[in-house]
């Protein structure tokens, strides 16, 4: 049925449920997995004042390094979990992208036939204000998506 799953994670407790569920599914199907973590662009417009450019430069470098380290550790744990179940897995960290855009592009580029991701399931004003990467993926994908809550 499914041969290659793309499992998106931000390392949160909720996303961990998606990782666990996706790995169990992959294990039962004998499918391969690609784990992806996406780091959103640095919020440049949050800075103001005459010294903003200088301060933002240092903060930008710290933000990128921290994101790389976090992704390396978190994706490493995902890979270990996959190895423990005998699931062939690779990990990818995408920088400076909106998560939904990166997930959609990677699902095609990697030849995935199922996307697994978690969702808070916000509704109404919360969804409008906070947006939903899962909703965006669902709106634009051409392959099935398994949403874990």
Image (cartoon, grey):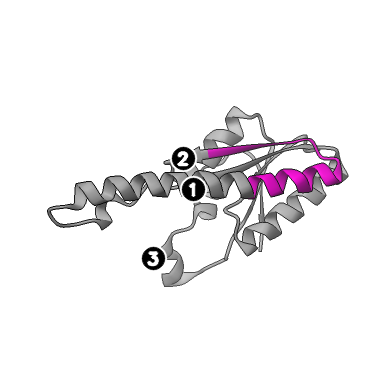
The foreground one among 47 and 69 is 69
Which portion, as a residue range, is magenta? Answer: 74-93
Vertical arrangement, residue 134 with respect to residue 104, above or below: below
**Which is more N-terminal, label 3 or label 1?**
1
Residue at 81 percent of width and 51 percent of height: 24
Residue 123 seen in the figure: yes
Q: Mark 1 points at which residue?
A: 67
| Front: mark 2 or 1 | 1
Secondary structure, mark 3, is helix
45 lies left or right of 63: left
Crowding around mark 1 (Cα neighbors within 10 Å: few <14, some 14 to 19, many 20+) is some
Q: Position of residue 78 (x, y in %)?
A: 70, 47
Mark 1 or mark 2, which is nearer the start of the sequence?
Answer: 1
> At 85% across and 46% down in the image, what residue appears?
85
Residue under circle 2? 95
Considering the image in quadrants, where does the N terminus appear? top right
Q: In which quarter of the image is residue 12?
A: bottom right
- Residue 26 vs residue 75, the one in the foreground: 75
Kindly report which numbered mark, 2 or 3, lies closer to the viewer in this rendering. 2
User: Most prominent secondary structure in the magenta stretch?
Assistant: helix
Local secondary structure at mark 2: strand
Q: Quick check: can you spot residue 142?
A: no
Query: What separation in Å lies between label 2 and label 1 (alpha carbons)?
Result: 8 Å
Cβ–Cβ below 8 Å for labels 2 and 1? yes
Tag in front: 1 or 3: 1
Q: Do the residues labelled 2 and 3 touch (CB within 8 Å)?
A: no
Q: Give the answer, above or below, for where 105 lies relative to 11.
A: above
| Residue pictured at 34% horizontal, 46% vertical | 60
Callout 2: few (<14), some (14-19), or many (20+) C-alpha neighbours within 10 Å?
A: some
**Is residue 76 shown left or right of residue 37?**
right
Residue tagged 3: 129
């Amino acid at each position: 049925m499914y041969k290659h799953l793309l499992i998106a994670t931000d390392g949160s407790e909720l996303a961990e449920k998606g990782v666990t569920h996706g790995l169990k599914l992959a294990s039962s199907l004998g499918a391969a997995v690609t784990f992806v973590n996406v780091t959103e662009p640095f919020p440049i417009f949050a800075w103001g004042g005459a010294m903003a450019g200088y301060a933002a430069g240092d903060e930008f470098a710290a933000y990128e390094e921290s994101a790389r380290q976090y992704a390396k550790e978190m994706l490493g744990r995902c890979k270990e979990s996959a190895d423990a179940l005998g699931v062939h897995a690779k990990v990818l960290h995408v920088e400076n992208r909106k998560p939904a855009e990166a997930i959609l592009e990677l699902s095609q580029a990697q030849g995935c036939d199922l996307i697994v991701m978690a969702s808070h399931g916000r509704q109404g004003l919360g969804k409008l204000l906070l947006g939903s990467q899962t909703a965006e993926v669902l709106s634009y994908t051409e392959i099935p998506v398994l949403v874990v809550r």
